[in-house]
Amino acid sequence: MSATTTTSPQTAARDEPPSLTSSSPRYGEKVILGALAVCGGISILTTVGIVIVLAVESSVFFRQSSIVEFLTGTQLSSNLGGGGTFGVLPLVTATLVITVIAMVVAAPLGLAAAIYLSEYAPERVRSLLKPILEILAGIPTVVLGLFALNYVTPFLTEIIGQENIFFFNMLSPGLVMGIMIVPTVASLSEDALSAVPRGLRESSFGLGATKRKTTLKVVVPAALSGIVAAVLLGFGRAIGETMIVAVAAGALPDLTFNPLKPAQPMTGYIVQRFSGESPRGTPAYQSIFAVGALLFVMTFSINLYARKFVERYREMY
Amino acid sequence: MDVISTPRSNARKALDQLGRPAERRFGELAFRGLLLFGTIIACLVLGVLLVSVGMDGIPRLNAAFLTEYSSRFADETGIRAQLTGTLSLMVLVALIACPIGVGAAIYLEEFAPRNRFTRLIEVNIANLAGVPSIVYGLLGLAVFVYFLSVGRHLLAGAATLALLVLPVIIVAGREAIKAVPQEIRAGGLALGATRWQVASRQVLPAALPGMLTGTILSLSRAIGETAPLLAVGAAFSIRQNVKPWELFSDFSALPIVIYQYASFPGEDFRVEAASAGIVVLLAVLLLMNSVAIVLRNRYSRRT
């Protein structure tokens, strides 16, 4: 920068400095620039659109049914006319049970993969495993849902016994969802781990610590905020994941914490209503926007919170 | 951390903690093995998925499955409408999302002033990437289907998917533009070109292969999406080819038919036909990804 701004004071005093503004106004370019700015602004419009749509459409719902009843109700049922009772708690508990199962799978496996790929893996193994994880991340979720229903559930039935587990249950989609989240957790944690400066590792080795001690007591703690962010972002993805649960968890909005029983998470409820019969404007139909708004608030706040952690480790190194 | 900050008086304790050489070596190996095991599990599950779906799906796959419309009978059903639907959606999503995404990427990298509005756009794009796809579906349903009265037609599906992949395209586009050396811009500007001339004739061509790769990868994400299409009313059973220029016709897509088959009780649909549908969907994805990889390799070889 300094090289471009050094004009000698003598020349500036003797001659008129050349004009740096363009000789022709180039209105066309201003139009293009405006169009490009609009493209950038469309992302803002999308967010604004989501917020407005969810607010307006769920206000239609809350005019017909109270917000307290919605947030604290344990019953969810609708009749053919599109009326009914709409308590969201059965959906929220199902979402939480499945998400917790998913994170119990995804957090340790994702972290193990991140540590292995960042600290241990030889280049050849790394270049083999990383693309596999990328492929896993690219498998459409409806495919994973069918995998849970057709292969994982029968497998679990064989282990646990037919009388203990239902055809639709929360365990199977939870496990598959956990595997789905592994690449997310792994790649974000790996970024955090490889951002830890080499010097820290080498000082630890210099003090006689083994590789395992260095990894567990120096590298992982130093990358902790990034790892937390990775797990949180994975958690956010799990809450919003739709097709795995829509296919394999069933469509029974019962308030239960038993992972072997069928249940309906928030996303599954919305999907089921899409193909339902209730016409627009009825409480049954409008309730999908209320559930969607709750889902959006949950995922959005988790993501915002996670970004804070990401910024923290970016600041550190 | 405490290994670093051990004072001299505690050095003995630290040495004890490290353990005897033999058990230390075992601990090291066990830890490494555990990590590798954890990494492999996810890969193994992917392998099991591909093999079991392939074993159930490939025997069911034949020419008629691709060229017939859907039927009540499992052995006669086909995915012609859904296959053309997915291809049409792909074309339309690319046509809608690419210009906007590339435009936004150019704006943010080459022109945007470093102010609060730009920062807001950046934070917003990062957050949009974390919004569940079903919420995009609700947006598409309210805005495209009802507010703009597109109806439950192809255009509504394509526009919703385009919004969904836009953040990904923008991020990939920005990465590609960032990779263009600063000297190219400086050279162009020094020769008297305007910033737009530099951006459109120097930076954009240089960044194009990278952008193309990112775009194809994000499109392959779009065609696997199910929930947003269900939201804007993708049809379960239609008996016509979906063509990309018939914007206001009924539409369906491969993920939709897989979801539909999954809801049938009989194994002939739920396992066999659904698996065959998955094989076709994964084949389309594989094709797109290979194109992206070929482009990426070509690009990285040149620079």
Image (cartoon, helix red, strand yellow):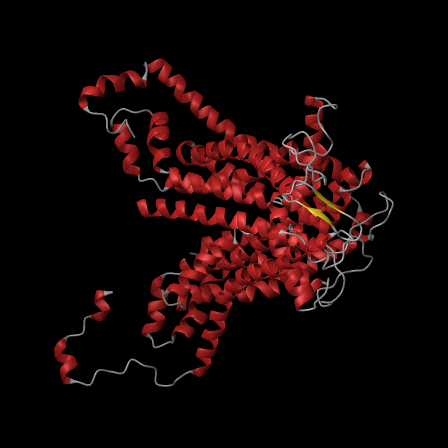
Residue A271: where, in percent of width, then height?
Answer: 69, 49
Residue at image point 75% right, 36% down: B56
Residue at image point 47% right, 78% down: A31
**Quadrant the N terminus of chain B occupies:** top left
How many labels were placed on the picture?
0
Residue A33: where, in percent of width, then height?
Answer: 45, 74
Q: Quadrant of residue B136?
A: bottom right
Residue B207: where, in percent of width, then height?
Answer: 46, 61
**Residue B103 visible in rendering:** no
Residue A291: where, in percent of width, then height?
Answer: 62, 50
A14 up-or-down from B42: above or below: below
A114 up-or-down from B246: above or below: above
Residue at image point 31% right, 19% down: B18
**Residue A63 visible in rendering:** yes
Viewer-nearest residue: A94 or A144: A94
Residue at image point 53% right, 62% down: A48
Q: Quadrant of residue B277?
A: top right
B74 up-or-down from A19: above or below: above
Q: Is residue A45 left or right of residue B18?
A: right
Q: Is residue B286 left or right of residue B36?
A: right
Viewer-nearest residue: B212 or A42: A42
**Quadrant the C terminus of chain B occupies:** bottom left
